[in-house]
């Protein structure tokens, strides 16, 4: 066991202990304080967030960007607590905290027995999305990048594989993804992060040139699937809403059109609630690396 493993495990079990000992209100207060502390100590990622916000929202001044950045830290502390609460939760407990906007779009595709490529982003409490899908609609296979810590990966997989959720390691390639679709399982993908030249296409995102992952569009074309973007965000009451966008039939659109549609939906959600997007990664580095290095 490495030193990092020990740190991760300590943080995990400390969080579980706090979850068992304190009320939701007390935990929310504590998580905000921890987020405030990490925000001030973690200058590296705070700078990355600020560069991303400047590129996406050039009209916002430094004070506004700082407020959004702090809220990002607070939100992800809250999502982490919710992730722990969802372990061993029943389907009823999962579904009672979520409402689904435009559910009829997904139901229509299911009634037609269409292959479905379900697209989302590192936005809101995205770990909750496959749990909701499996609890309400059935089998889903989710493509993931395993954690660097094998011990933590084993622990966290227990939460991610509740109900009928299959996890597919991204490194295994497209074969298990195609197999899942051919077995009438919905395929869930996160497509918003920077991609290499051989796995992405260039397009405009917030008016800036980026590389956007194209794998979901290619898989949809290969299996004649409908592509359905969906994003989850939190409500003031502590519940969540999953917003489903219009389905796009891969038989009627090019892979470039399908990918641009994903980017447009993602941008729309970030503009709606920028503090729920995972701005910790260098989203624009392919064409604006110099800004992150200043």
Image (cartoon, grey):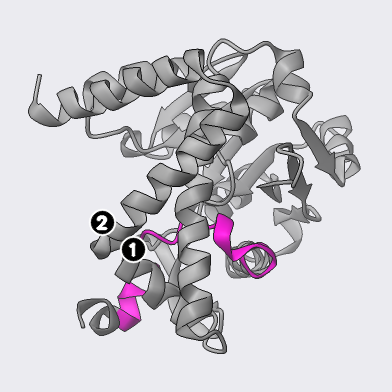
Which image quarter holds the N terminus? top left
In the rendered image, the vertical position of residue 21 relative to residue 240, given as above or below: above
Residue 211 circle label: none
Q: Earlier in the sequence, mark 1 or mark 2?
A: 2
Task: Residue under label 1, please give it.
Answer: 198
Query: Is residue 203 among the parts visible in the rendering?
Result: no
In the rendered image, the vertical position of residue 227 relative to residue 91, given as above or below: below
Q: Distance of mark 1 from mark 2, alpha carbons? A: 36 Å
* Front-lying residue, 159 or 69: 69
Residue 174, percent across and down?
Answer: 43, 39
* Front-lying residue, 99 or 192: 99
Q: Which residues are magenta?
A: 269-288
Residue 167, percent across and down?
Answer: 46, 25
Residue 56, percent across and down?
Answer: 52, 79
Label 2 neighbour load within 10 Å: few <14, some 14-19, many 20+: few
Q: Nearer the viewer, mark 1 or mark 2?
A: 2
Horizontal side of residue 252 vs 191, given as left or right: right
Q: Is residue 48 magenta?
A: no
Q: Residue at x 29, y 83 (%)?
A: 291
Q: Residue at x 61, y 48 (%)?
A: 119
Residue 27, percent across and down?
Answer: 52, 30
Horizontal side of residue 293 vs 271, given as left or right: left
Which image quarter holds the C terminus? bottom left
Task: Residue under label 2, please give it.
Answer: 41
């Amino acid at each position: 066991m490495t030193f990092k493993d020990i740190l991760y495990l300590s943080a995990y079990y400390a969080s579980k202990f706090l979850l068992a000992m304190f009320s939701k209100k007390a935990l929310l207060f504590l998580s905000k304080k921890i987020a405030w502390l990490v925000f001030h100590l973690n200058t590296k990622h705070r700078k990355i967030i600020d560069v991303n916000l400047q590129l996406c929202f050039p009209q916002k001044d430094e004070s506004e960007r700082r407020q959004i950045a702090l809220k990002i830290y607070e939100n992800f502390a809250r999502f982490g607590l919710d992730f722990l609460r969802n372990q061993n939760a029943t389907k009823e407990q999962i579904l009672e905290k979520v409402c689904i906007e435009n559910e009829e779009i997904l139901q229509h595709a299911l009634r037609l027995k269409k292959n479905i490529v379900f697209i989302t982003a590192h936005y809101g409490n995205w770990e909750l999305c496959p749990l909701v899908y499996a609890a309400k609609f059935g089998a889903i296979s989710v493509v993931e990048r395993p954690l660097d810590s094998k011990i933590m990966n084993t622990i966290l997989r227990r939460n991610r594989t509740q109900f009928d959720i299959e996890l597919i390691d991204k490194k295994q390639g497209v074969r298990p993804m195609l197999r899942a679709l051919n077995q009438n399982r919905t395929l869930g993908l996160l497509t918003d992060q920077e991609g290499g030249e051989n796995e992405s296409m260039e397009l405009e995102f917030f008016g800036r040139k980026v590389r956007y992952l194209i794998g979901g569009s290619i898989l949809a074309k290969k299996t004649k699937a409908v592509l359905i973007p969906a994003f989850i965000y939190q409500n003031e009451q502590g519940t969540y809403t999953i917003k489903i966008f219009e389905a796009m039939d891969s038989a009627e659109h090019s892979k470039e059109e399908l990918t641009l549609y994903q980017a447009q939906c993602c941008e729309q959600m970030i503009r709606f609630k920028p503090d729920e997007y995972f701005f910790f990664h260098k989203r624009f580095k392919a064409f604006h690396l110099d800004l992150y290095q200043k």
